Amino acid sequence: MSINVVEIQNLPLLPRLLKYFSDPFILSAYATAFLSSLVWMYVVTKLPLAVAFPVYIGITFLLVIVGGWQFLAEEITVMRLVSATLILSGIALGVK
């Protein structure tokens, strides 16, 4: 049940918006963004920003590598593995 662009391009604005916002992929994106915002606010209250932000950026980079491999069939090259290892090492050193 995903959005068919050709099907809805001629709909009036309100029905088109309702169709977009009833799509499960769009709803899951909003839910994920909301939950990640809550987690981020909690983390920032518990850790110094100088620790929390680099860890967040590093984990995001690692998740992009895994997501690209899992969902888009992207290749994980040796350079990406080396980069991921360096990032994990930096996170391990940074949180101590």
Image (cartoon, helix red, strand yellow):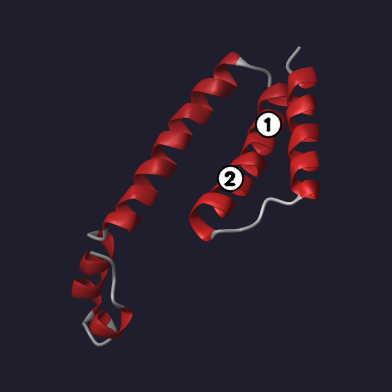
The Cα atoms of the two marked residues, 2 and 1, are separated by: 20 Å
Indicate which disc, 2 or 1, sits on the residue closer to the N terminus: 1
Vertical placement of residue 80 versus 49, above or below: below
Q: Secondary structure at mark 1?
A: helix
Vertical placement of residue 9 versus 49, above or below: below
Q: Residue at x 50, y 22 (%)?
A: 42
- The crowd level at tag 2 (other Cα within 10 Å; few <14, some 14-19, many 20+) is some
**Which amino acid does the dot numbered 2 rest on?**
Val
Nearer to us: label 2 or label 1: 2
The residue carrying mark 1 is: 53
**Which amino acid does the dot numbered 1 rest on?**
Phe
Question: Residue pushed farthest left?
Answer: 15
> Which dot marks residue 66?
2
Q: Residue at x 80, y 19 (%)?
A: 93
In screen coordinates, is 96 left or right of 23?
Answer: right
Residue 26 image offset from top left, x and y in percent: 34, 57
Quarter the N terminus occupies: bottom left
Q: Residue at x 78, y 47 (%)?
A: 78
Q: Secondary structure at mark 2?
A: helix
> Which dot marks residue 72?
none
Question: Residue pushed farthest top?
Answer: 96
Residue 35 image offset from top left, x and y in percent: 40, 35
Q: Quadrant of residue 49?
A: top right
Numbered label tally: 2
- The crowd level at tag 1 (other Cα within 10 Å; few <14, some 14-19, many 20+) is some
Residue 33 image offset from top left, x and y in percent: 43, 43
Quarter the C terminus occupies: top right
